[in-house]
Image (tube, grey):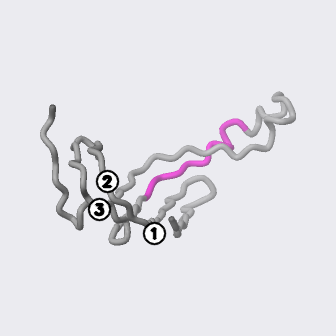
């Protein structure tokens, strides 16, 4: 599996930023299933080819980042030495993930719930 990633951050000022990321998953491999198994919420019937060669999987997202350091910098001298000099940040954002995992060349056979 390969997972190249592109990340970047645009800083509006010394405290506020907008980070973004783009990741691609390069999966390779195949196998043949001789027993039934669960995939997500579906039970997949046996006797199917599992091949990740045609899998398209990527994720991208963005967020807002805020540096919190200035809120505690003046009181930091009262802390133990190992807690001084940290750059504390908070993030909130959203990420989208797309995963197209082909089972039986994109036409999986499902079994009934038993």
The dot on residue 33 is: 2
Q: Can residue 24 be seen in this view?
A: no
- Asked if residue 97 lies left or right of residue 43, the reply is right
Q: Provide residue 41's location: percent of width, then percent of height.
A: 24, 41
| Labels 3, 1: front one | 3
| Labels 2, 1: front one | 2
Q: Earlier in the sequence, mark 3 or mark 2?
A: 2
Residue at 83% x, 36% y is 82
Residue pointed to by mark 3: 49
Q: Provide residue 8's location: percent of width, then percent of height.
A: 54, 67
Q: Closest to the observer: 74 or 17?
A: 17
94 versus 10 height, above or below:
above
For the residue carrying disc 2, how many other residues have a C-alpha within 10 Å: few (<14), some (14-19), or many (20+)?
some
- Asked if residue 11 lies left or right of residue 50, the reply is right
Residue at 24% x, 55% y is 47
Residue at 62% x, 42% y is 68
Q: Was residue 42 drawn as part of the magenta stretch in this picture?
A: no
Helix, strand or loop for disc 2: strand
Residue at 26% x, 44% y is 36
Q: What's the distance in space between the residues labelled 3 and 2, CA to CA?
A: 6 Å
For the residue carrying disc 1, how many other residues have a C-alpha within 10 Å: few (<14), some (14-19), or many (20+)?
some
The dot on residue 26 is: 1
Residue furthest to the left: 112
Tell me the quarter of the picture where residue 102 sits: bottom left
Query: What residue range appears in magenta?
Result: 62-72
Q: Closest to the observer: 10 or 96?
A: 96
27 versus 70 height, above or below:
below
Tell me the quarter of the picture where residue 24 sits: bottom left
């Amino acid at each position: 599996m390969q997972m190249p990633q592109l990340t970047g951050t645009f800083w509006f000022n010394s405290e506020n930023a907008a980070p973004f990321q783009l990741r691609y998953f390069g999966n390779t491999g195949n196998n043949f299933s001789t027993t039934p198994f669960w995939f997500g919420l579906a039970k997949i019937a046996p006797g199917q080819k599992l091949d990740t060669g045609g899998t398209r999987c990527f994720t991208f997202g963005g967020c807002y980042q805020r540096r919190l350091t200035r809120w505690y910098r003046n009181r930091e001298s009262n802390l133990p030495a190992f807690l001084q000099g940290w750059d504390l940040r908070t993030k909130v954002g959203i990420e989208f993930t797309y995963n197209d995992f082909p089972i039986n060349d994109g036409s999986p056979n499902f079994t009934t719930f038993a």
